[in-house]
Amino acid sequence: MRDLIRLKSHSCQIASAAAGRLAMLLLMTAGLALVAGCAGTRGGPIPYNVAAFGQPDSPTLTTVSSDYKIAPADTLRVSVFQVPDLTGDFDVDLMGNISLPLIGTVKAVDLTTSQLDQEITKKLGEKYLQNPDVNIALKASARRNVTVDGSVQSPGMYPVNGPTTLVQAISMARGITSDANAHRVAVFRQIDGKRMAAAFDLYSIRKGEMKDPEVYSGDIIVVDGSRIKTIQNQILMTLPIIGMFNPLIY
C-alpha cells in the first residue's frame, strides 16, 4: 500500500512539472510573438509618403561618354599591364568604393574612369610598381539597373527594361526573407543632383492602402530586417542624403 501511495505521489509530481513546463513554453511563445509584432513596424529616420519623391535624374542610356561619373554598384574592369594578379572586374560598393589588391579601398564614386585611372596609378606607383600602366573601363552601369539589398532572398542588381514597380523589383530578388520588416523599405534615388530617400510599407501596398511606386534605373532599394542594420547605417553615414522633404538625421 505504501508503495502504491508513493507511486501515485511521484506520478502527480511528474504531471505537475510537465504542466509547469508547458505553461512556461506557452508564455515564452506568446512573448516572442509580442516582441516580433513590436519589431515589425514603421519608423526610422527616412520619411514615408514623400510627395516630392519623383523621377530621378536622366541616366545615360546609350554610349557612356568620357565624362561619365562612376556610381555605386557599377562594375569596373581594372587592367594593369603585365600584372594579371591586379587585373579583374571590381564592383563599386554602396558607399562608392572599390577594394583592390595591394592598395585596398579606393574611392570611385563621382569620378570619371580617367580620374580613377590616375588615382590607382598614383597609389600603385608610390609603393609597389615602377611606372604602372593602368586602364579603367566601365563594364556595367548601375544606372541601367535597380539594386535590391537588405533582407531579400537574392540581393543584387536587376535590369530595368520598362516600367517597374517596387513590388516587382523585390520579386526579382525572390522576395523578402523571414526576418524582414516589410513595414520599412527604403528607396534611395538621385534627384536634381541630390541623394534623396523615401520609405514605403509593403503591407500597405499589398492591401491597396498605399500606391505601389515606380522604381527607376539607378535606384537602391533596401529592405529592413535583422541583417540590414549595418548596411542601412553605412548608407546613412556615408551618403549626403538631402531633399525637398525633411532632411534625414544621421
Image (cartoon, helix red, strand yellow):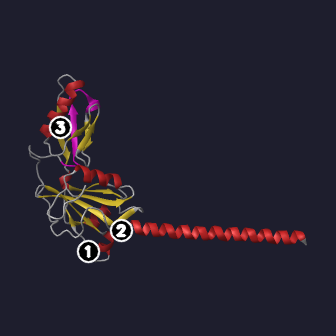
| Residue 118: quadrant of the picture | top left
Looking at the picture, which amino acid does disc 1 mark? Met
Mark 3 crowd level (few <14, some 14–19, many ≥20, 10 Å Cα) = many
In percent of width and height, residue 196 lies at 18, 59
In space, the residues marked 1 and 2 are separated at their CA atoms by 16 Å
In percent of width and height, residue 92 lies at 24, 45
List the residue tagged with mark 1: 210
Looking at the picture, which amino acid does disc 2 mark? Thr
Does the magenta-highlighted stretch encompass residue 247? no
In space, the residues marked 3 and 1 are separated at their CA atoms by 44 Å
In this rendering, is residue 9 above or below 150? below
Question: Which residue is depicted at the point 41% across and 68% down?
Answer: 38
| Residue 40: quadrant of the picture | bottom left
Mark 1 crowd level (few <14, some 14–19, many ≥20, 10 Å Cα) = some
Segment tinted magenta in the rendering: 71-86
Q: Which mark is residue 136?
A: 3
In percent of width and height, residue 221 lies at 27, 59
* SS label for mark 1: loop
* SS label for mark 3: strand
Mark earlier in primary sequence (3, 2): 2
| Residue 4: quadrant of the picture | bottom right
Question: Which residue is depicted at the point 84% across and 69% down?
Answer: 6
Does the magenta-highlighted stretch encompass residue 75? yes
Q: Which mark is residue 41?
A: 2
